[in-house]
Image (cartoon, rainbow, N blue to C red):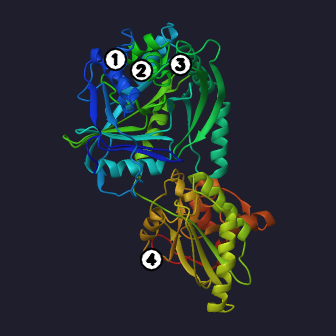
Amino acid sequence: MSEAGEIRFISRTGHRGYRNPRDVVEARTVGDVLPALEQIERAVAKGMHAAGFVAYEAAPAFDAALACHDPSDLPLLWFALYDGIDERRQPPPGDNYAVGTREPRVSEAEYAACIARIRDWIASGDTYQVNYTFPMDATFSGSPLDCFYQLAQSQRSDHCAYMDTGRFQLLSASPELFFSLADGVLRTRPMKGTHARGRWTAEDAAFAEALRASEKERAENVMIVDLLRNDMGRISETGSVHVERLFETERYPTVWQMTSTIASRTGANVPEILNALFPSGSVTGAPKIRTMEIIKEIEPHPRGIYCGTMGWWEPGGRAEFNVAIRTMTVDSEKGTATYSVGSGVTWDSSASAEYAECVSKAAVLHNLGEHFDLLESILLREDYYLLSEHLERLRDSATFFDFHYDQAAIESLLTAKREVWRAEYGDAPLKVRLLLSRDQSVRVEAAPAPESTRVRVGFAAHPIDENNVYLFHKTTRRGAYEAARASRPDCDDVILWNARGEATESTTANLVVEVEGKRLTPPIPCALLAGTFRARLLAEGAIEEAVLTKSDVRAAAAIHLINSVRGWIPVEWVDEQGSNR
């Protein structure tokens, strides 16, 4: 558990922490926001470090024309003042917390109705783009700090932030920079444009390219870039505002995001920057004033910290603040957690597509405490069989899941272990398990390779979820396979199948069937692992890809299982009634 005033910032390259504040400054009315910021600026000028947040509903403090709901119980502004940075390393994440099922406050039908209203406003010229959001509520118990560490570890974003204000704990896995200030250079990096991740490497790359090429997403992005350029121009040296990078794509665990980076030279301090930029145009839309009026009309609840900002600033004029998206608010008095999601709605937006985008953003809360290793099972005889293919697949999965991958170190370890195992096992064929962890550790273990004895096989009782990304990568997360095998206790292994009735693979091997003299195997999009032995046979022309229904498998002249350790595995078919084929 954390203490009031404890703050943590985590990025992919480092961390920054604060504990035991000297003072806390907060504002609960719009009129108190600017005086509070001025008080904090004076403290920083005297050598104090400041860290805290500004809620979305503080916007009218900077411009009375910016419409917002009245604030909730969360302060509009909260900053703690410290003597310096807490240099202690973060502890390993624990799992002493529980988050209940998320309940959206907006149904999909209500969401679609609001999208229709937004399109009407766009048609009438009131707005070009509206960032429409809604909250989800859940119960919460345990340690918010443990939950934050799990969230930060799973998302690997560069602008994660945790703040304990006493009653409220704020947990942000934001990937978006609101602004940074260093040596008189002001930078913003608006994030606008989203596409779901693919399930395997090729599909993932295609989705990234689709985002880069999307006229709709590029139009959304450039609209916000123009808005922020105008905002930055109010406090920057004349002619210094420029776009450093346009339409970059960034990979996160559940989505691809499009970002652009804008920079300028400025003599402004943090309160002056907030006065010009807050809230970020990426979480309002354009034009900002009219669009925020629309947001207030269609969103019945205050956003709170969501779409506000969390950050730090220190003596010498350095500061960094995020856009508080991917952010959870825990109310420790009520035992609740609120997590909001949203997307930029334009004339070309589809209600169903926008809702799906929101759902994909909420997926960051799935399986926070579940860790896994990447895995390869390799046959060792005189040498490692299909080693280059195994390492290529491991590298692809490491890239997909953002694991560190050092092929030279892995090959060196395998070479050293081969001599050890040969001394222990002689010339016996071995099954080698190679495991790569997110913490960069590599483990190998060996055991005698299993013989290719006949296995009793039938269809699993239920279809697999073809959106389960772990079906496309070899990992230690095997829950789907274990459940499928348990559904047929009369079988040694089961053939998996998807919701369309297409056969995919077994829990340990790829599937090959003989039909009209051809050996056929299901293609990857059916939802299966790209086995290394399967790939070799395809390259040699020994097998071909084809979509296979359950009926096709039952009617096949022969059924085989294949993997790189056991090769061709003989099969005895067992139908659902228990009789043999």
Alpha carbons under labels 4 and 1: distance apart: 71 Å
**Which marked residue is nearer to the observer: mark 3 or mark 1?**
3
Q: Residues within 10 Å of mark 4 (few under 14, many from 20)?
A: some
Where residue 330 appears, x then y in whole percent? 28, 40
Which element carries disc 2, helix, strand or loop?
A: helix
Q: Amino acid at mark 2?
A: Pro
**Which marked residue is nearer to the observer: mark 3 or mark 2?**
3
Which element carries disc 1, helix, strand or loop?
A: helix
Numbered tag placed on residue 267 in the rendering: 3
**Which marked residue is nearer to the observer: mark 4 or mark 1?**
1
**Quarter of image, res 395:** bottom right
On the image, numbered disc 2 is attached to which residue? 271
On the image, numbered disc 4 is attached to which residue? 490
Where residue 229 appears, x then y in whole percent? 58, 17
Alpha carbons under labels 4 and 3: distance apart: 74 Å
Numbered tag placed on residue 34 in the rendering: 1
Mark 1 vs 2: CB contact within 8 A: yes
Alpha carbons under labels 1 and 2: distance apart: 8 Å
Q: Amino acid at mark 1?
A: Leu
**Which marked residue is nearer to the observer: mark 2 or mark 4?**
2
Q: Amino acid at mark 4?
A: Asp
Alpha carbons under labels 2 and 4: distance apart: 69 Å
Q: Earlier in the sequence, mark 4 or mark 1?
A: 1
Residue displayed at 35% across by 20% down: 38
